[in-house]
Image (cartoon, grey):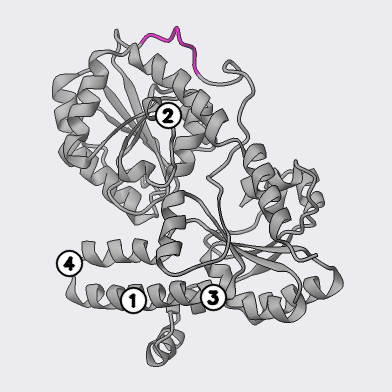
């Protein structure tokens, strides 16, 4: 959301930003750049998204998607109404599916605005992965119901938006297959990329063979796919890697990481939550992304590219990134992941090649200003004059 907004601002667009926030994901204005907050006239509205059994039961009876309905707030709708009534907007850019319950409010108070859905992924697929991975029969039944109602909603909402901005061509093709006939623009995840290969990152002179390669994983451990991925990696992959390369190290950090987990695994260091993620990552040689389902660390992959930190990932971990330069990282199916890592560590000088290729890929594919310029041009072609 920040990358898209910054990319539009840096290309001359006037942007008003309205954001919902929850207890789990609060809006802390003092941590944001004051100039940015002023530029977008940022407003935040608190949203209560915790499980409410009464609302869940009503959604069940009505056949509605509880995943979606819990993101609707009358207070947010009133603030949105006020904003749209006071100024004329060419485009209302909806960041993610969970903002679409407010489309009727937008249509009523901004009838000439282009309503565009920014799609991060097909949301129902994440829930589909969850119920298929769940063994508890009661949870499996509940999650399957949530998946089915979410899929129905996700398909039905396509008739209410004018354009779609998908994060990859794969998602865009999915919407075409669902029958969406409007304009689709692909805008990948963007970051502020360094202009020089030497702006950030570790030194190419850093020794890696003498003391072993130091790998790391940085991710939110309150997100189930990250926990499951690390569990799988430490149980199935790490023992093979350590046997082939005994001096290797694997460092873990992230939000919600308890300091007492995985501490008994040889070669593993648990750092818990760290204050500065960038400073933490800069200490190590290789980011490992052992995702088996879902998403959640793709941001870290792109950030690592921009800092010249090599990346090794499962194919699921890079799904949707549309990396046009496959030599910028090591990726493999889960069954082949251990062999791919072992082979990489046989030739540590390849890490330097991955570092340079990753930085080039960041500038070529993930620069937020380029993404913003292309998106602004797309909107310019479709706004109602």
Query: Disc 2 on helix, strand or loop?
Result: loop
Query: Disc 1 on helix, strand or loop?
Result: helix
Q: Quadrant of residue 291?
A: top left
Which of the two labelled residues, at mark 1 and mark 3, occupies the earlier sequence position? 1
The residue that mark 2 highlights is 325
- The mark total stands at 4
Query: Would residue 326 be counted in the magenta stretch?
Result: no
The residue that mark 3 highlights is 159
Q: Is 350 on the left-hand or right-hand side of 181?
A: left
C-alpha gap between disc 1 and disc 2: 36 Å
Q: Residue at x 28, y 15 (%)?
A: 212
Q: Are marks 2 and 4 in contact (CB under 8 Å)?
A: no
Q: Badge 2: few (under 14), some or many (20 or more) residues near its Cα, within 10 Å?
A: some
Which of the two labelled residues, at mark 4 and mark 3, occupies the earlier sequence position? 4
> Residue 220 versus residue 194: which sits nearer the camera?
194
Q: Is residue 384 above or below residue 36?
A: below
Q: Which residues are magenta?
A: 202-207
C-alpha gap between disc 2 and disc 3: 35 Å
C-alpha gap between disc 2 and disc 4: 38 Å
Which of the two labelled residues, at mark 1 and mark 2, occupies the earlier sequence position? 1
Mark 4 or 1, closer to the camera: 1
C-alpha gap between disc 4 and disc 3: 36 Å
> Residue 230 versus residue 79: which sits nearer the camera?
79
Which of the two labelled residues, at mark 4 and mark 1, occupies the earlier sequence position? 4
C-alpha gap between disc 4 and disc 1: 18 Å
The residue that mark 1 highlights is 148
Which of the two labelled residues, at mark 2 and mark 4, occupies the earlier sequence position? 4
Mark 1 or 3, closer to the camera: 3
Q: Residue at x 43, y 57 (%)?
A: 173
Q: Are marks 1 and 2 in contact (CB under 8 Å)?
A: no
Q: Residue at x 64, y 23 (%)?
A: 195
Rendering coords of residue 301 (x, y %): 44, 36
């Amino acid at each position: 959301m920040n990358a898209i907004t910054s990319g539009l601002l840096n290309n001359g667009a006037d942007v008003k930003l309205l954001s919902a926030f929850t207890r789990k994901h609060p809006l802390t204005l003092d941590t944001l750049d004051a100039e940015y907050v002023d530029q977008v006239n940022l407003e935040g509205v608190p949203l209560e998204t915790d499980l409410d059994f009464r609302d869940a039961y009503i959604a069940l009876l009505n056949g509605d998607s509880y995943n979606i309905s819990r993101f609707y707030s009358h207070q947010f709708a009133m603030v949105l109404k006020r904003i749209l009534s006071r100024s004329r907007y060419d485009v209302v850019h909806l960041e993610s599916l969970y903002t679409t319950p407010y489309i009727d409010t937008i249509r009523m108070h901004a009838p000439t605005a282009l309503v565009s859905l920014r799609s991060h992924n097909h949301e129902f697929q994440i829930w589909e992965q969850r119920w298929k991975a769940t063994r508890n029969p009661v949870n499996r039944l509940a999650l399957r119901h949530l998946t089915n109602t979410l899929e129905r909603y996700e398909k039905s909402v396509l008739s209410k938006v004018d354009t779609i901005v998908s994060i990859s061509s794969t998602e865009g093709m999915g919407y075409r297959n669902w029958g969406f006939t409007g304009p689709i623009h692909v805008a990948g995840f963007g970051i502020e990329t360094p202009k020089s290969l030497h702006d950030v990152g570790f030194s190419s002179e850093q020794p890696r063979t003498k003391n072993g390669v130091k790998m790391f994983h940085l991710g939110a451990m309150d997100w189930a796919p990250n926990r499951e991925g690390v569990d799988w990696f430490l149980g199935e992959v790490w023992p093979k890697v350590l046997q082939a390369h005994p001096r290797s190290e694997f460092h873990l950090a992230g939000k919600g990481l308890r300091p007492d987990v995985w501490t008994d695994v040889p070669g593993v260091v648990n750092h818990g939550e760290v204050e500065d993620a960038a400073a933490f990552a800069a200490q190590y040689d290789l980011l490992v992304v052992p995702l088996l389902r879902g998403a959640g660390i793709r941001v870290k992959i792109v950030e690592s590219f921009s800092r010249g930190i090599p990346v090794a990932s499962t194919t699921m971990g890079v799904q949707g990134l549309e990396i046009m330069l496959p030599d910028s990282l090591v990726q493999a199916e889960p069954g082949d992941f251990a062999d791919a890592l072992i082979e990489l560590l046989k030739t540590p000088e390849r890490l330097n090649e991955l570092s340079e290729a990753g930085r080039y890929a960041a500038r070529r594919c993930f620069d937020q200003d380029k993404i913003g310029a292309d998106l602004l041009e797309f909107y310019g072609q479709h706004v109602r004059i």
